[in-house]
Image: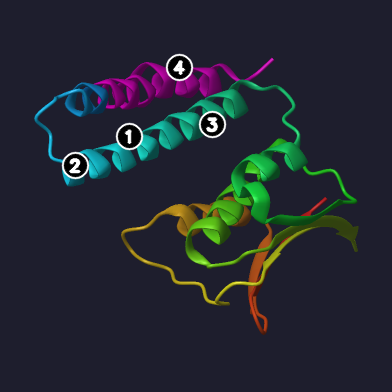
Amino acid sequence: MNDPGVNQIARRIHDGIAQDLVALGYSLDQALAAPELPISTRAELRSLRFGVTDLIEKVRREILSLRSSAPDLAELAKQVCGPRLGQVELQAEVTESVFPIVLELLRNAVRHSGASLINLKTFSSDALTVIEISDNGNGSVELKDDRFGLIGVREIVSELSGQIEFISLAPGLLIRVSIPS
């Protein structure tokens, strides 16, 4: 059984953001149905509609992830990375408390690295659970004050008394998170 607070967050996302995205999609559908719409505008609106549909699917996956009692890390990695997901080696079990870390780091690799291949590995070493995410992208990490993904990752790692390392590869990046077991 999930934490009631987590279920409440899932409900709020479903009843708020998800419904707003669906309504936005319907509005775009109505605009697309206008017969006098110029072809170039129609093409741009269609592209926006596809983007909104993708966002709706992502929000649905997040809601499902929040409501799932035991999500499968490999399956979540496939959903986030799609065809870019390379090797997945899960040699150590990770607690659900680190799932947000893994998901945010995978999302960042997909969105910002320019990588065509993203790998996920977990293992145990010296009373630590180690999570490694590597890619063949641009090899950089940029912390921005107005972006909260990596800030949140660092906060969770700190709360779990862990460490995070960003190691530039040629090409790509290796992110290693070590959490006491």
**Residue lying furthest bottom:** 170
- Neighbor class of circle 2 (other Cα within 10 Å; few <14, some 14-19, many 20+) is few
Separation of marks 1 and 2 at Cα, in angstroms: 15 Å
Element under disc 4 = helix
Q: Is residue 15 above or below residue 17?
A: above
Q: Earlier along the polypeptide chain: callout 3 or callout 1?
A: 1
Q: Earlier along the polypeptide chain: callout 1 or callout 2?
A: 2
Q: What residue is rendered at 45% in x and 17% in y?
A: 11
Q: Which mark is residue 3?
A: none
Q: Nearer the viewer, mark 4 or mark 2?
A: 2
Q: Which mark is residue 62?
A: 3
Residue receiving disc 4: 11
C-beta proximity under 8 Å, tags 1 and 2: no
Residue nearest the observer in this picture, 69 or 78: 78
Q: Is residue 143 above or below residue 156?
A: below
- Residue 122 in the image: state x and y as whole percent: 82, 55
Q: Which stretch did the figure color magenta?
A: 1-26
User: Please, what is the dominant secondary structure of the magenta stretch?
Assistant: helix
Separation of marks 4 and 1 at Cα, in angstroms: 24 Å
Residue type at the position of mark 4: Arg
| 20 left or right of 82 in image | left
Q: Is residue 4 above or below residue 75?
A: above
Residue receiving disc 2: 39
Which quarter of the rendered picture does the N terminus lie within?
A: top right
Element under disc 2 = helix
Q: What residue is rendered at 49% in x and 57% in y?
A: 111
Residue nearest the observer in this picture, 31 or 57: 31
- Neighbor class of circle 1 (other Cα within 10 Å; few <14, some 14-19, many 20+) is some
Residue receiving disc 1: 49
- Residue 75 in the image: state x and y as whole percent: 73, 37
Residue nearest the observer in this picture, 153 or 142: 142
**Which quadrant of the structure image shows residue 178?**
bottom right
